[in-house]
Image (spheres, grey):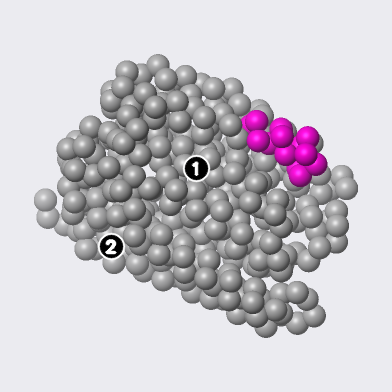
Amino acid sequence: MGQRKRTIKDWIIATRPWSFPASSIPIIAMGSYFYYLHASTGEPFDWVSVLLALPMMMLFQAGGNLVSDAADHEHKVDLPGSLNGVRHIQDGQFTAQGSRHYGFTLLGLATLIGLLILWRIFTLQGSTHAMPVISYLSGAIGLTGIALAVWYPTIKYHALGDLDILLCYALLPSIGLDMVATGHVHYATLLLCLPFGLQTVAILHANNTRDIRNDRRAGIQTLPHVIGGKASQWLYAAEVLLPYVLIAVYFLMGLAPVWTLLAWAVFPIAVKNARWMMSVPEEEEQGIATLDQKTAQMQLFTGLLYALGFLISTFLT
């Protein structure tokens, strides 16, 4: 199908905006945590860097989505009639090359914002942010994230996409934000990012579990393809339910305040999604056609309440 004239809506929809909770929640949740630390312990907190990191991460995700879509089209992973909802190439809004160029443009914009953040923390005076090592390490994290986004299709095709997503949308942004917002890394950051990180991975896992037969036809190996449908269902259930257990454990360990338990309000939705996944016969694509989008909504609500818990505790400190 030939390329047709694009509308503003086409440009927006191509980026898959429904999936943006994956990139926004790490900044919102961990930024709230670092502000909570600032209020309770007096540690440095650079709110400007946190605000800049939010559009940077969303542009990073949008660009990565577009580059991945181009690769999936060229490798015949996404064909007409597939259930993943990605249609901007198949329906003629973009060519594969156009989608890739659009993606790299957005990744370039994300890089510019990242450079602005690095310039700020490199030039700040009178705080730990003046240490050049923070700028260098933050830059290295950013470059690693971009590399993981650009090569995500190849990584996904070799069953490592789940690890890529955990790094790109939990560990790396949380560590990087810690550096630019506070001037160093707290060991708790590595733990506190896991609740939303696991649910972000679950978005991809729901997608890939649904697409096992399609990916087998395309000759690629995602994690669900390797471990099988039933094991994938159990893994999904663990990814959406374990975060609430972790939040409770963090509270008992003194790593998170009691108000973060507000995230448990979303637990019934997580149980519903887990039951949905477990009730569908293996490799029955239609049965879980929209579970990835429902998982993204669940991750958004959990992450927002998690962040709200830190903010409420900040004002009650």
Q: Determine the secondary structure under disc 2.
A: helix
Going from N to C along the chain, the mark reached first, 2 or 1, is 2
Q: Say whether residue 134 is visible.
A: yes
Question: Looking at the image, is mark 2 or mark 1 nearer the viewer?
Answer: 1
Give residue 180's position: percent from left, percent from top.
65, 68
Label 1: how many Cα within 10 Å (few below 14, some 14–19, many 20+): many
Residue 172 is left or right of residue 306, and the answer is: left
The residue at the far right in this view is 317
Q: In this view, does 112 lie above or below 64?
A: below
- Dominant secondary structure of the residues highlighted in magenta in the image: helix
Residue 234 is left or right of residue 154, and the answer is: right
Q: Determine the secondary structure under disc 1.
A: helix
Q: Front-most of 88 and 154?
A: 154
Residue range corresponding to the magenta coloring: 244-256
- Residue plotted at (34% across, 60% down): 151
**Which residue is disc 1 drawn over?**
200
**Which residue is disc 2 drawn over?**
100
